[in-house]
């Protein structure tokens, strides 16, 4: 939590959301004693880790949320774009938006998304998997745009964000084909090993 000018507070959602996640995990495991069919540990770990990834992803993409602190001050209730980048300068988070690091970072950030979508929804078709990645990336950016208009998050959405959106989609789609290739490679390797043993 970081206070700015005492008129608003920039909230990091990760600690509180992680606390809710721990409560959910406890309740989910506890309810297994009363369920007729319990969840497999594999699916449970994938689901929990996906929720945690989603929490981190939202925090990174949205950058935190602001709430008014001093209702008597009508000049500055929510955070402005200038204050936002001033905060990042203060904590030495300086990265060129056109740098290769920023581009690669936006690709890497969404690589887990494609993998999780394949594992959670057991998608057999690449078209469905790619469509879900594109839809998920669009939903995140539309939500960020809407919350930016309300002043709850930083209101900055331009052509650079569209470029980043394309890199985000590229990261998610890339992970789908990486996972498919890895699975096929492992299966063919096991099949060849079994064939050699039989011979």
Image (cartoon, grey):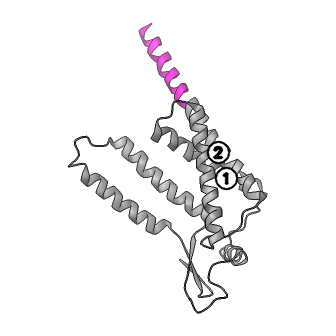
Relative to 26, is 64 on the left or the right?
right
SS under mark 2:
helix
Instruction: Name the spot of residue 151 as percent of width and height, x first.
Output: 63, 73
Disc 1 secondary structure class: helix
Q: How many marks?
A: 2
Res 73 quadrant in image: bottom right
Among all residues in the image, which is located at the extreme bottom? Answer: 72
Q: Residue at x 65, y 85 (%)?
A: 76
123 to the left or right of 111? left
**Residue 120, percent from left and from top:** 45, 41
Q: Is residue 63 left or right of residue 30?
A: right
Which dot marks residue 106? Answer: 1
* Point 60% across, 39% down: residue: 131
Where does residue 189 sit, x and y in percent of width and height?
Answer: 51, 22
Disc 2 target residue: 171
What residue appears at the point 60 percent right and 46 percent down from the top-left corner? 135
**Residue at image x 34%, y 56%?**
25
Q: For the residues labelled 2 and 1, say whether their Cβ atoms are less than 8 Å apart.
A: yes
Alpha-carbon distance for marks 2 and 1?
7 Å
Q: Earlier in the sequence, mark 2 or mark 1?
A: 1
In the rendered structure, which segment of residues is drawn in magenta? 182-199
- Whole-percent x and y of residue 7? 60, 86
Is 9 in front, or is 112?
A: 9
């Amino acid at each position: 939590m970081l206070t700015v000018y005492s008129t608003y507070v920039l909230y990091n959602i990760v600690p509180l959301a992680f606390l809710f996640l721990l409560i959910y995990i406890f309740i989910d495991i506890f309810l297994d004693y009363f369920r007729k069919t319990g969840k497999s540990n594999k699916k449970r770990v994938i689901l929990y880790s996906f929720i945690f990834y989603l929490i981190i992803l939202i925090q990174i993409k949205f950058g935190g949320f602001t709430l008014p602190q001093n209702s008597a001050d009508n000049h500055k209730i929510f955070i402005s774009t200038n204050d936002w980048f001033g905060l990042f300068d203060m904590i030495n988070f300086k990265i060129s938006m056109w740098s290769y690091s920023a581009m690669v970072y936006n690709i890497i950030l969404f690589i887990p998304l494609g993998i999780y979508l394949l594992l959670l929804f057991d998608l057999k078709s690449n078209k469905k998997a790619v469509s879900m990645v594109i839809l998920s990336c669009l939903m995140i950016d539309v939500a960020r745009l809407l919350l930016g208009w309300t002043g709850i998050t930083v209101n900055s959405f331009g052509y650079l964000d569209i470029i980043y959106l394309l890199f985000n989609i590229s990261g998610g789609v890339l992970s789908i084909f990486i996972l498919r290739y890895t699975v096929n490679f492992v299966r063919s390797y096991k099949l060849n090993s079994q064939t050699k043993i039989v011979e």
